[in-house]
Image: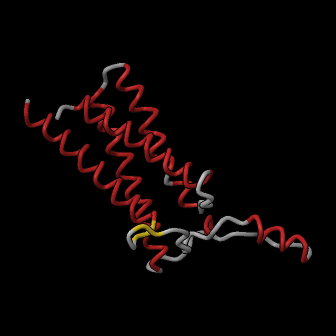
Amino acid sequence: MTARPALAALVAASVLALLVAYGLQHLGGLRPCHFCLLERWPYGGIALFGGIALGFRFDTLGLALAALLLLGEAGLALYHVGIEAGVFQLSAGCIAGSGAGSVAELKAQMMNAPPTCDQVTARLFGLSLAAWNAIFALVLLFLATMTLAWDYFRR
């Protein structure tokens, strides 16, 4: 596979990942935690910059950028899985709430607080959605790096 079809596949896969994430949030009622929201950014970057690279025919550069973004995505997702498993402590962005002045404010904060990053909101075949995201990102990263290597050594 050459860089252009691989980049097009990564852009399509990134758009699909975002559609699934937003669909689960808005149609499925799953509220994302702080890390779930952070994990959307690399896919958005791949969709945006990959689309621009395809339009201007900078396929190899776009594929290399996508690989770097996927490396970051996989790192975020694996860290999130580690938080869910209790391997890592919650980061400051995952801890909900600030000081409430009254019981009514505390109740309002509790009702509107996003889930903490160590709570698994949904599982599919025994794995959390963060674990599935890590697997997806690693598969896409493998595709990107193998295509880059193939193009490099084929010259």
Q: Position of residue 147 (x, y in %)?
A: 19, 40
Q: Position of residue 122 (x, y in %)?
A: 51, 68
Furthest residue in direction left, as rendered: 154
When asked about the image quadrant of residue 136, the answer is: bottom left
Q: Residue at x 43, y 61 (%)?
A: 77
Furthest residue in direction top, as rendered: 56
Q: Position of residue 132 (x, y in %)?
A: 39, 61
Q: Residue at x 38, y 70 (%)?
A: 125
When asked about the image quadrant of residue 47, the answer is: top left
Q: How many marks?
A: 0
Question: Quarter of the image containing the N terminus?
Answer: top left
Q: Residue at x 39, y 73 (%)?
A: 126
Query: In this rendering, would 37 be left or right of 56?
Result: right
In terms of depth relative to the viewer, which is nearer, 100 or 115? 115
59 shown above or below 66: above
Q: Position of residue 80 (x, y in %)?
A: 47, 66
Question: Quarter of the image containing the C terminus?
Answer: top left
Query: In this rendering, would 140 be left or right of 91?
Result: left
Q: Residue at x 63, y 58 (%)?
A: 29
Please, which colouring scheme is shown?
Answer: secondary structure
Furthest residue in direction bottom, as rendered: 86
Query: In this rendering, would 111 be left or right of 69?
Result: right
In terms of depth relative to the viewer, which is nearer, 23 or 53? 23
In terms of depth relative to the viewer, which is nearer, 37 or 65? 37
